[in-house]
Amino acid sequence: MELQRQDSTSFVVRSKTLKLIFLGTITFFLLSAQADAPDRSFVMPMADFAKPIVLTSKQVDRQSFHSNSFVPSRLVIPSIDVDASIEAVGKDDVGRMDTPADVNRVGWYQYGAKAGATGNVVLSGHLDDLNGPAIFSNLGQLPIGEVVTLQRKNQVATYEVVSVIQYRLEQVPLASIFAATQAKRIQLITCAGPYDEKLGYRDRIVVTAHLIETK
């Protein structure tokens, strides 16, 4: 009987010791959190536009989970008579999205998403040149609901236009156009507005269309 009482007393002592260690640990973490906390309440910083997140080709491949995604080779927009070949473009000398040398071709930003994939499929084209209108001369006239297709051989990704907006150059929402996103959409870009010989075109037209079908 005496042996049983000793075992019972030992168990109670161990239980109390464990509880004290547990409470001490919790108190330590709470005090640490209070010590690290700022003196004033947190305020979310605000900014107009973040810098674009440029993804590498490998990152794009990892993010292109859609089984029907592909590198586009042709852009077709019936309502503005666009049926143009697409070439992959990167960045120019100052880090901006480059444009194709041929004014009748469309540039696909190779660091963005592929056709049909999750993300922004960014395409740019010229408004005009010294000889007259170029491939995107009528981009600003696209009606909402118009169908836009990206093609490669027997693969087709179909998009529906949801917005056509003209921005001043300094107000173009670069983050929305180039950053990673869970949406499946294309962004078509061209110049607009008055032209200055030194500064170029004042504005940009940005057309956004959402994916509705791939095959």
Image (tube, rainbow, N blue to C red):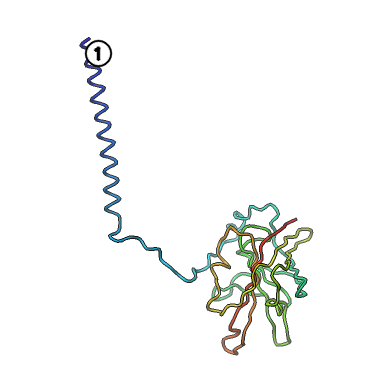
- Bin the neighbour count of mark 1 within 10 Å (Cα to Cα): few under 14, some 14-19, many 20 and up: few
From the viewer's perspective, tell me whether residue 101 is left or right of residue 168.
right
Dot 1 amino acid type: Gln
Q: Residue furthest bottom?
A: 197
Q: Which residue lies furthest to the front in this view?
A: 144
Q: Quadrant of residue 85?
A: bottom right
Quadrant into which the C terminus falls: bottom right
Quadrant into which the N terminus falls: top left
Up-down relation of residue 116 to residue 20 (above or below): below
Q: Name the residue under label 1.
A: 4
Q: Which residue lies furthest to the right in this view?
A: 154
73 or 176: nearer the viewer? 176
Q: Where is residue 24 in the image (x, y as percent from the top left)?
A: 25, 39
Q: Position of residue 2 (x, y in %)?
A: 20, 11
From the viewer's perspective, tell me whether residue 124 is left or right of residue 37.
right
Q: Where is residue 171 in the image (x, y as percent from the top left)?
A: 53, 76
From the viewer's perspective, tell me whether residue 43 is left or right of residue 167.
left
Q: Residue furthest left?
A: 2
150 or 31: nearer the viewer? 31
Q: Position of residue 102 (x, y in %)?
A: 71, 77
